[in-house]
Amino acid sequence: MMTPEYPEPILLGANPSVAVRYEYGNIQLKLQTQILDGNPTAYRFSIFNQSDSISPLISKIFFPDDTIIVILPVDFFQIEDLGYVAILVPQGDDFEIVKNYFTIEQTGVFEFPTAYIRRKPVMLVGNVSQRIGKIPIVGAKVQIFDSTGVVGYSETNISGQFEIELRFPFKDRKDLHLTIYTGGRYSRWRDRIDFQGEKWLNKSVVLGPSALFISQGMVYRVIQNETPFREGPENGSPIKFFLSEGDIFVAETVAGDQLFGQIEILIEKNGYFQHFEGWIKNKYLKFIQ
Amino acid sequence: MRNKFLVLFFLTIIFAKVSVRIESKPSNAHVKIDGEPFGLTPIEEISLAPGLHKIDLAYEEYVPIQYELDLQLATSVVLLFQLNQIHTVTFSTQETGLNFVLDSKYNWFENKIKMKMEEGTHNLKVLNGDSLIEEKKLKINEASEIFYELPLSESQLELSQQKVDEALKALKALQSVKDSIENK
């Protein structure tokens, strides 16, 4: 007689016996610096989890001659994390911070792009508008220059606003000037600017004559630079000063090809207008209203 | 810019690989990873993405293994599986009316039965109706035959002891006879 057989194997049902041995390599994070401006005394190099920008995972100080390199075990980084950010903070002045977002693909050397070291920029922001009605002036050319030439440039937008970033350390400079040119619509505006050690300067400029001034007669615009503004109508009469393209002249009297009237100058320092009377040849003027 | 790095990050998750080696004792076990056959152990240098993977090992006359691996980011990982053999065991007894239960799961009433048993220590319970008569460990490490007898009762034990004592006594008498013959 055949011995019956149990229909299924008798198993212990224990967890499988398995040994798991991981081998982790190293990850080397490298960063080279190139100084464009300033002299950092040291660098602080930190690694943050992107989900936690407060507590660095690691932070080290390097001197300027050191090679910035951090060697970490691969399990320092977790695949589940939303990536990391390496932050380089140059020490010793108000330098720009350099950030590199990264994730770890494999072991080995991970080299970040060269970090350009420079001090933080200064910003000039402002707006340009007409004195009458405070209407924004669009497309005015705004320039900052020093003795070497133009160092910053912008144009006003539809709201009359402009913004100029100066990449180099201008915050302590005393030799900067700002000009605003409206293509002859108003005379070229010019003034000194001084950031006074700050990184931010706001400048609002109004251009054009006052409403009171243009109500006093026929309004003309000077169409040529260095137009003589004379004391009398005769040739050879002393020149009070030269007018610029865009200056507004309000005429009271016409005598042949000469017009007598006033120009208006804003004394910015005191904040009031001063009017000067004199004569201009008609050929230097364009009638407006 | 941040978006660019996020895309790079997710690409990294997709493409990051870990070198995996799978060994088993004994070797030549059939391996499947995530349902795909990968040949026989030892398996060298498979590249797997970090994360969860299902690994199956099968070898004739051994207990199959299903293992869920949560693979971490690393250079490499070695997995060594220990396969447990299955032995054929014949269990028999002359007792009647007993219920045998192995590992609280497998039971039978037959006086003789052949079983495939995983090597290791199993737990056998012998019941008569609902009452437990005996519980004992069965250590299986090879194909074998197990003959089961009910444990002796106290009176049977006493009787057995008397028989042993009598036998010893007889043996002692024989020994003394033998000694006297040798002396002569």
Image (tube, rainbow, N blue to C red):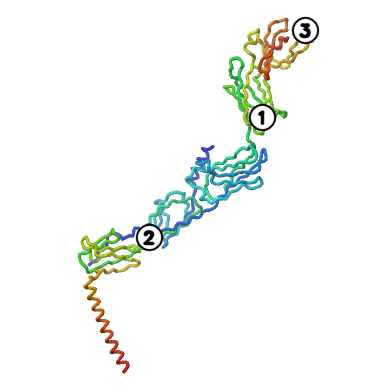
Location of the N terminus of chain A (image quadrant)? bottom left
Q: Position of residue A167 (x, y in %)?
A: 64, 33
Residue under label 1: A196
- Tag 3: amino acid: Glu
SS of the residue at dot 3? loop
**Number of residues whose C-alpha sits closer than 10 Å to that of mark 2, classed few (under 14), some (14–19) or many (20 or more):** some
Whether residues under marks 2 and 1 lie with C-beta atoms below 8 angstroms apart, the answer is: no
Q: Position of residue B15 (x, y in %)?
A: 49, 46
| Residue B59 numbered tag | 2
**Number of residues whose C-alpha sits closer than 10 Å to that of mark 1, classed few (under 14), some (14–19) or many (20 or more):** few
**Distance Cα–Cα, label 2 vs label 1:** 83 Å
| Residue A206 numbered tag | none
Q: Identify the subunit bearing mark 2.
A: B
For image coordinates 30% across by 92% down, the residue present is B181
* Residue A233: quadrant of the picture: top right
SS of the residue at dot 1? loop
Residue under label 3: A234
Q: Identify the subunit bearing mark 1.
A: A
